[in-house]
């Protein structure tokens, strides 16, 4: 372990990784909660396509009170349905996603030495991000189940405090993890691309910039971090969309059987093109989300005196 310190914190120490985890809580918890209205409409386009035909139509339907027959409140309260399980679930996910990514990236690199770790960096990014997301989704899954249930069937419960106990009492703890397979199928590829694409896109953008990263102003540095994150988000939002549709459908579906049986039932019902319902609102949402997540994460690390994410290839050698 290196003795180098930034902001009084030893790099790759438990305190360093804890700070990365806190940055992850802020980056994921804040951003996902902020886009709850768009996520609400996206989930309903996927799960209730007869009533919700598009993004703006869905927003108007809820805001105006026309969706009261389905159990939605009108106005701001209606379009923020599901904010509490979103905030808690994605804060936990962010803690594990960013915290464990930094841990795994460091410890997966150490056995190879600096030269080979650089040559194998793509494999290290993939392995570290996949490992981190596998853990993060276990923490997210119960809250994602409650979120989707409340958002697609608001008559069931009003939010986290009544929705979580009701699901446990009526369906058992196991049903909170019914969507873990599709969630892994959605989130693990998403996170691999989110981190791999970010790291590689940032390399290119830092190389193009006339200044070295170490000489950039905070504004210049954060602009590249946001741009890299946004492009990465658009890519991974597209790749993970079919699995996202299955998660929305499975958490609403009430039938016996395992994950594969439920997924096969849903696919038979909606077909291939049905898996792409809600594609555009989700791509816009995920692109914005991912860019802001990297921005918040980078800003937090910078404020704490830690190295900001992303670097040019010459910085990594």
Image (cartoon, helix red, strand yellow):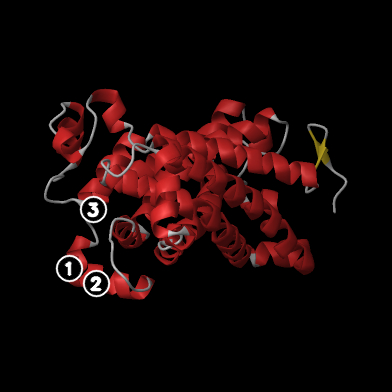
Looking at the image, is 308 positioned above or below residue 262? above
Work out which residue is located at the far top of the displayed protein and give it: 75
Q: Which type of secondary structure does the marked residue at label 1 adopt? A: helix
Where residue 141 sits in the image (x, y, percent)? 47, 55
Q: Tell me if mark 1 has few (under 14), some (14-19) or many (20+) residues whose alpha carbon lies within 10 angstroms of its own.
A: few
In depth, the one of 304 and 277 nearer the eye is: 277
**In terms of image quadrants, where is residue 159?**
top left
**In terms of image quadrants, where is residue 60?**
top left
* Mark sitting on residue 269: 1
* Mark sitting on residue 46: 3
Q: Tell me if mark 3 has few (under 14), some (14-19) or many (20+) residues whose alpha carbon lies within 10 angstroms of its own.
A: many
Residue at the (39%, 44%) spot, across then down:
163
Q: CA distance from mark 1 to mark 3?
A: 12 Å
Where residue 74 sits in the image (x, y, percent)? 22, 26
Q: Is residue 260 left or right of residue 119?
A: left
In depth, the one of 53 and 202 nearer the eye is: 53
Residue at the (51%, 50%) spot, across then down:
198
Q: Which type of secondary structure does the marked residue at label 2 adopt? A: helix
* Mark sitting on residue 258: none
Where residue 69 sits in the image (x, y, percent)? 14, 37
Q: Sequence-wise, which precedes: disc 1 or disc 3? A: 3
- Is the residue under label 3 in contact with that under label 1 (CB below 8 Å)? no
- Is the residue under label 3 in contact with that under label 2 (CB below 8 Å)? no
Looking at the image, is 190 positioned above or below residue 231? below
Q: CA distance from mark 1 to mark 2?
A: 6 Å
Looking at the image, is 29 positioned above or below residue 260? above
* Mark sitting on residue 265: 2
- Is the residue under label 2 in contact with that under label 1 (CB below 8 Å)? yes
Residue at the (40%, 61%) spot, across then down:
179
């Amino acid at each position: 372990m290196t003795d180098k310190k930034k902001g009084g914190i030893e790099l790759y120490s438990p305190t360093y990784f804890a700070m990365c985890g806190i940055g992850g809580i802020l980056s994921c918890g804040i951003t996902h909660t902020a886009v709850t209205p768009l996520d609400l409409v996206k989930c309903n386009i996927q799960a209730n396509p007869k009533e919700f035909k598009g993004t703006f139509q869905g927003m108007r339907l809820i805001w105006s009170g026309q969706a009261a027959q389905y159990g939605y409140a009108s106005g701001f309260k209606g379009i923020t349905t599901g904010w509490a399980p979103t905030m808690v679930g994605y804060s936990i996910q962010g803690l594990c996603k960013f915290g464990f990514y930094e841990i795994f990236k460091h410890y997966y690199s150490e056995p190879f030495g600096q030269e080979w770790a650089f040559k194998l960096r793509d494999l290290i990014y993939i392995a570290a991000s996949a490992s981190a997301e596998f853990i993060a989704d276990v923490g997210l899954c119960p809250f994602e189940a409650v979120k989707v249930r409340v958002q697609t069937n608001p008559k069931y419960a009003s939010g986290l405090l009544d929705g979580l106990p009701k699901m446990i009492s009526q369906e058992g703890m196991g049903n909170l993890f019914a969507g873990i397979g599709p969630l892994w199928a959605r989130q693990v590829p998403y996170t691999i691309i989110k981190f791999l694409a970010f790291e590689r896109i940032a390399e290119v953008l830092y190389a193009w910039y006339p200044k070295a990263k170490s000489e950039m102003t905070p504004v210049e540095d954060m602009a590249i971090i946001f741009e890299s994150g946004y492009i990465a988000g658009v890519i991974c939002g597209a790749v993970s969309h079919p699995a996202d549709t299955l998660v929305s459908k499975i958490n609403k579906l009430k039938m016996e059987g395992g994950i594969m049986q439920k997924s096969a039932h849903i696919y038979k019902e909606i077909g291939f093109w049905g898996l792409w319902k809600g594609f555009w609102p989700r791509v816009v949402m995920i692109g914005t989300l991912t860019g802001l997540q990297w921005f918040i994460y980078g800003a937090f690390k910078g404020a704490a005196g830690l190295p900001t994410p992303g670097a040019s290839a010459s910085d990594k050698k």
